[in-house]
Image (cartoon, rainbow, N blue to C red):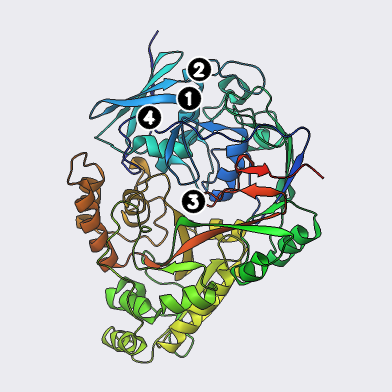
Amino acid sequence: MRRSHPLAAAALALALLPGAGPARGQAPAPSGDATLTMGVEASFGVDPHFLFLGPNMAASRHIYDSLVGRDEESRFTPALAEAWRALDAQTWEFSLRRGVTFQDGSPFTAEDVAFSLARIPALPNNPGPYTSNLRTISRVEVVDAHTIRLHTDQPNPTLPGQLTNVFIVSARAAGGPDPWGASTAEFASGRAAIGTGPFRLERFRGSEGMSLSRNEGYWGTPAAFARVEMKVMGNDAARLAALLSGDVDLIEQVPPADVARLEKDARVSVFKRNSDRIMYLIPHLGAGALPLLVGPDGTPLPANPMADARVRRALSLAIDREALAARGLDGQAIATVQMVPEGFGGWDADLPAPRPDPEAARRLLAEAGFPQGFGLTIGCSNNRYTNDARVCQAVGQMLTRAGFQAKVETQPGTVFFPRTAVGRNDLPLMLFGLSLSSSRDASYILSTAVHTRDPARGFGQGNRGQFSDAALDARIAASISRMDAGREAALRETMREAIAALPIIPLYNQVTITAARRGIAYSPRMDEQLVATHARPTEPAR
């Protein structure tokens, strides 16, 4: 019997996908009782719908599955959906994998998909909701136990890519009297953390990490390791020391300064891949005044200079992107002014990274009424992105040479991200990064970080600077919904317009760097997520 589920959602994004992707790659066969111990940089949660951040998604990929998967190169692959097709411009049909069971033995059906999609917008007090991944979905139709249709309020060629970030939970285990079912605390306890993924949760240890065991009933190729210990190690030096001493087997976020040395060390292997993440500065335009914007005498400015496009251009001209990549990241980054990495849709070969021009920046500040410059605070995390605190310090020095009096404030991601949420943000300038694998084109960053914030329609979730331009909004909405041959050119032109407006200031494209002890091989993911299924032993267990 068909059932329809209304879903609060909205607009568009993500990757053009006319049908099912290539078959899932074959992983190695299981390796007995071996345990893989991984050192990860940031703490994470196990509620797969709470706080849309990379560390949370990486953790979720061990326990849960999405309808559409993605491989190391962020190519889309069948997962819980074996195939998908567009029935018309506003209807996508997904054929679900048969014979799949949750880790508690209950069968996976379309009702679990419907419940998971409905839970995301209903989950309360979520500082980083996953709702942007539901853009344009207006109705969920359960056709039968293994067929589901997603109806959209406008054409959305990239809906399957959005679903690579949407994890499916058990309606039986995670249900409850509230619309969102189980609470985030009930997931942390393990009661509701029941998925169909390659591992089952044994114990979640909060900010310390979690313990996993191989899901022997997994529908796909079994994981190569029987157990996984994920340990949170926020300090780069401590994480690296743990690897070299043998306390952990695999680490993420290898400090770029250590890459050359580690590549010569016979005890370890280094694995790299250009990532899908663009790092950028967000100027805070939405507030009329901010206490951390001050005049040369240190008194707060009565008006926000970030609203002046000349000031934003001065910020961009002050940055030496090549030097930032070479020195701030020891050459392990790619300088850019674009909103997508090379190879993604919308990337423009005729748009190179600009040369820095501090003197031109000073002239623009003077034209904007600040001949002596002004003071501002740059905020950033110190444990979320590669060398994030070091990069912030380098940016502060560059801005100071161009006439700004820049101060740098760094905080752990658990403090920084809630602080910078819209409505609470007091920082004039912020360092952020956005992973683009769920679109593989410019549609996601344009709709998420540039479009005016519109939660009801799923636009602007990452627009923490509160930039708003109605004409640009219209261009974004039109270009990302195109399903014809002109889509690529439209995205490129819209991105050029957005770059000129400087709602965000792109700096560089990160590189994913992981390292493992000798005897373990790892395939880094373009989305930077450390996932145990990409690791395999190359020697017998110790």
Where is residue 314 drawn, in percent x and y?
A: 33, 80
- Residue at image position (56%, 50%) is 524
Where is residue 12 drawn, in percent x and y?
A: 31, 42
Tag in front: 4 or 1: 4
Crowding at mark 4 (Cα within 10 Å: few <14, some 14-19, many 20+): some
Q: Nearer the viewer, residue 253 or 106?
A: 253
Q: Secondary structure at mark 4?
A: loop
Crowding at mark 1 (Cα within 10 Å: few <14, some 14-19, many 20+): many
Q: Which residue is tagged 2?
A: 109
Q: Secondary structure at mark 3?
A: loop
Q: Secondary structure at mark 1?
A: helix
- Residue at image position (49%, 50%) is 527
> On the rendered structure, is 409 left or right of 86?
right
Measured Cα–Cα span from mark 4 to mark 1: 18 Å
Q: Which residue is tagged 4?
A: 20
Where is residue 88 drawn, in percent x and y?
A: 23, 25
- Hey, what amino acid is under mark 4? Ala
Marks 2/1 in contact by CB < 8 Å: the verdict is yes
Q: How many marks?
A: 4
Measured Cα–Cα span from mark 3 to mark 4: 20 Å
Tag in front: 2 or 3: 3
Q: Earlier in the sequence, mark 1 or mark 3?
A: 1
- Residue 541 vertical placement versus 381 (above, below): above
- Hey, what amino acid is under mark 3? Met
Q: Nearer the viewer, residue 409 or 441?
A: 441
